[in-house]
């Protein structure tokens, strides 16, 4: 059976803190051997749909949604979930589409948008995947805590780059069996996966902040 290299947390220029062009992203994935990615831009699926049209490999339509209680990822989406909704409504909207709910970097100490602890407990019955390794986490203890959460609740785990730049693609992923294209088939295959985990330097966050500021200034300039 074919083995896939899967990264479930990737951003494009459709995110306010990424400048990654779609064609270059596809080329980088091909170069590094990634053959299944989830595009999870902030509060939009426009980038995911565009990459899906371009790529010769599997692209899962995802979204990193800013709920009132922190960030939640929806996968296998048909339409975008609006930002700013209560957390329970956010996960329910993902489920209504037949999608999967993933929790990104649940214990990261430095991101202001990380899901709140009390919210995590509230939405856990709806969670399908816990991101047990995020390459951008500064403290590896935060990743270990995420893995412990997944094991405690018997949930599948992912290892993800959270790539906002081309440099990050292909460093962290899950090696897993191919799947039938359905969310449930994906979950079953993911549960048999093996994580490949390579952290990125915390300095990468400086580049992300610079990109976000540059885009904000560009918007102000063109008003």
Image (cartoon, rainbow, N blue to C red):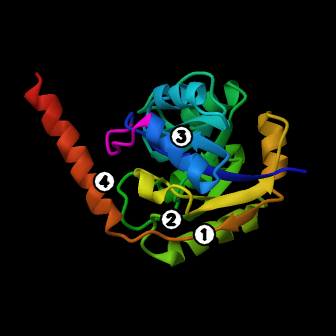
Query: Disc 3 to disc 1, how far (Cα)?
Result: 21 Å
Asked if the residues shown at circle 1 and circle 4 are in contact, with their CB atoms under 8 angstroms apart, the answer is: no
Q: Secondary structure at mark 4?
A: helix
The structure residue drawn at horizontal position 63% and vertical position 28%, both measured from the top left corner, is 77
Q: Secondary structure at mark 2?
A: loop
Query: Disc 4 to disc 3, how far (Cα)?
Result: 20 Å
Q: Which residue is mark 2?
A: 135
The foreground one among 151 and 213 is 213
Asked if the residues shown at circle 1 and circle 2 are in contact, with their CB atoms under 8 angstroms apart, the answer is: yes
Q: Secondary structure at mark 1?
A: loop
Can residue 67 be seen at all in this image of the molecule? no
The secondary structure making up most of the magenta span is loop
Residue range (magenta): 15-22
Residue count near mark 1 (Cα–Cα under 10 Å), binned few <14, some 14–19, many ≥20: some
Of marks 1 and 4, which one's residue comes earlier in the chain? Answer: 1
Instruction: Tell whether position 49 is magenta.
Output: no
Q: Which residue is mark 3?
A: 26
Query: Disc 4 to disc 2, how far (Cα)?
Result: 14 Å
Discs 3/2, front: 3
Asked if the residues shown at circle 3 and circle 2 are in contact, with their CB atoms under 8 angstroms apart, the answer is: no
Instruction: Tell whether position 16 is magenta.
Output: yes
Residue count near mark 4 (Cα–Cα under 10 Å), binned few <14, some 14–19, many ≥20: some
Query: At which x and y percent is residue 158?
Result: 66, 57
Residue count near mark 3 (Cα–Cα under 10 Å), binned few <14, some 14–19, many ≥20: many
């Amino acid at each position: 059976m074919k083995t896939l290299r899967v990264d479930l947390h990737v951003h494009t220029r459709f995110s306010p803190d990424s400048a990654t062009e779609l064609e270059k992203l596809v080329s980088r994935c091909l170069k590094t051997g990634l053959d299944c990615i989830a595009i999870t831009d902030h509060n939009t699926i426009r980038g995911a749909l565009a990459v899906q049209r371009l790529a010769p490999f599997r692209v899962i339509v995802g979204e990193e949604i800013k709920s009132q209680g922190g960030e939640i990822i929806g996968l296998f989406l048909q339409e975008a979930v609006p930002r700013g909704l209560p957390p329970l409504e956010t996960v329910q909207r993902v489920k209504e589409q037949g999608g999967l709910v993933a929790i990104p970097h649940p214990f990261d100490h430095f991101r202001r948008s990380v899901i709140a602890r009390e919210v995590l407990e509230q939405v856990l019955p709806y969670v399908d995947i816990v991101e047990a390794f995020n390459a951008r986490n500064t403290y590896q203890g935060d990743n270990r805590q995420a893995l412990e959460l997944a094991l405690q609740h018997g949930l599948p785990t992912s290892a993800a780059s959270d790539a906002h730049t081309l440099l990050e693609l292909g460093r962290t992923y899950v090696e897993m069996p191919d799947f039938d294209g359905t969310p449930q088939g994906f979950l079953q295959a993911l549960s048999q996966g093996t994580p490949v985990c390579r952290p990125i330097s915390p300095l990468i966050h400086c580049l992300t902040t610079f990109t976000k500021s540059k885009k904000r200034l560009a918007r102000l300039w063109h008003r």
